[in-house]
Amino acid sequence: MLWCQIREYQNADYSAVRMIYSTGFREHVGTVYLLALKQTWIQAMLCGFCLLTYILSGSILTCMLCVGGVLLATRMAVQYIFVQGIQLGLREDLLDIRNSYMQPGSRSCFWVAELKGSIVGTVGILPCVEEPGAWELKRISVKKEFRGRGIAKALCETALEFVARHNVKRVVLFTSMVQTDAHKLYDSIGFEKEEEFVWPSLPARLINFMVFKYVHRNGNVMSC
Ligand SMILES: CC(C)(COP(=O)(O)OP(=O)(O)OC[C@H]1O[C@@H](n2cnc3c(N)ncnc32)[C@H](O)[C@@H]1OP(=O)(O)O)[C@@H](O)C(=O)NCCC(=O)NCCS
């Protein structure tokens, strides 16, 4: 038996849900920064910049300080892009969670995992805008200190049972190349990677940031 309760979203969960989403999203900043530093063009620019500052200043210390500054600026740029991404989510479906997911009779729902009165995990499901006929699993996140105990799996399976009751055959979700823990979760509950593409924005193209589309063909839903 699961040691925490999976239940439908209530208005009182609003701040906790938004906080869990923001924190879970933000924790990938470091990985994306490393991805940026692995790009050949960024490494070439850093070397060029290093050489140029050395030629101009004649000082290795100045050269190191300038390169340090560039690295810091790159990190701040990645962080800024993440904050924009988080704000976007908070302004979309998570701005009015009840309206987005919990309308009576609507084909969408949002669940939380509750432990001793605290919200420790979230997931939502709703018809997919990009692919009519399919539903999309969204906002899967579990507080760091409660991970590895099957909470995300239980949340996702609750969502998959819900769509099975609505006779939905295809559930999709979008994740990124850096969310590797999530990929293991999706593999373990029967999702398969169907597509991968570079996220269509300039910063994403510059660092070759890939997004994966996973699909679950409903019908073999496991019990929680
Ligand atoms: C992805 C995330 C939701 C997983 O939550 P969780 O509660 O730790 O996952 P679970 O304990 O339910 O694990 C489910 C399955 O995934 C596997 N898994 C999850 N995290 C793993 C890890 N770090 N290493 C190895 N396997 C892992 C588990 O082994 C388990 O498979 P099993 O039942 O076959 O053993 C959590 O890491 C998270 O919130 N990440 C930040 C937010 C995020 O990236 N969300 C995804 C948005 S697309």
Image: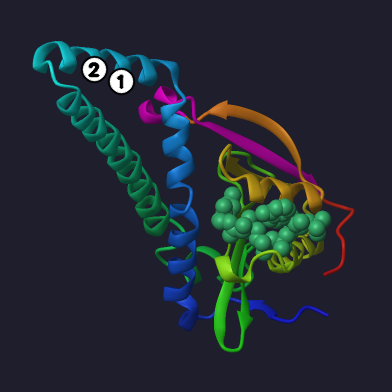
Q: Position of residue 146 (x, y in %)?
A: 62, 71
- Would you say residue 116 sits in the magenta stretch? no
For disc 2, the marked residue is: 49
Amino acid at circle 2: Phe
| Most foreground residue, 205 or 89 | 205
Q: Position of residue 95 (x, y in %)?
A: 40, 64
| Most foreground residue, 118 or 180 | 180
Q: Position of residue 192 (x, y in %)?
A: 77, 40
Count of all numbered marks drawn on residues in the image: 2
- Above or below for 44 versus 3: above
For disc 1, the marked residue is: 46
Q: Is residue 1 left or right of residue 198?
A: right
As drawn, the residue found furthest toward the right would be: 220
The quadrant of the picture occupied by the C terminus is bottom right
Element assignment for label 1: helix
Element assignment for label 2: helix
User: Where ligand 1 lies, by quadrant?
Assistant: bottom right
- Whether label 1 lies within 8 Å of ligand 1 gets the answer no
Marks 1 and 2: in contact by CB < 8 Å? yes
As drawn, the residue found furthest toward the left would be: 57
Kindly identify the residue that appears in the image at 86 percent across and 58 percent down: 221
- Above or below for 91 versus 7: above
Residue 140 visible to the viewer: no
The range drawn in magenta is 200-217
- Above or below for 113 versus 163: below
Residue 180, numbered circle: none
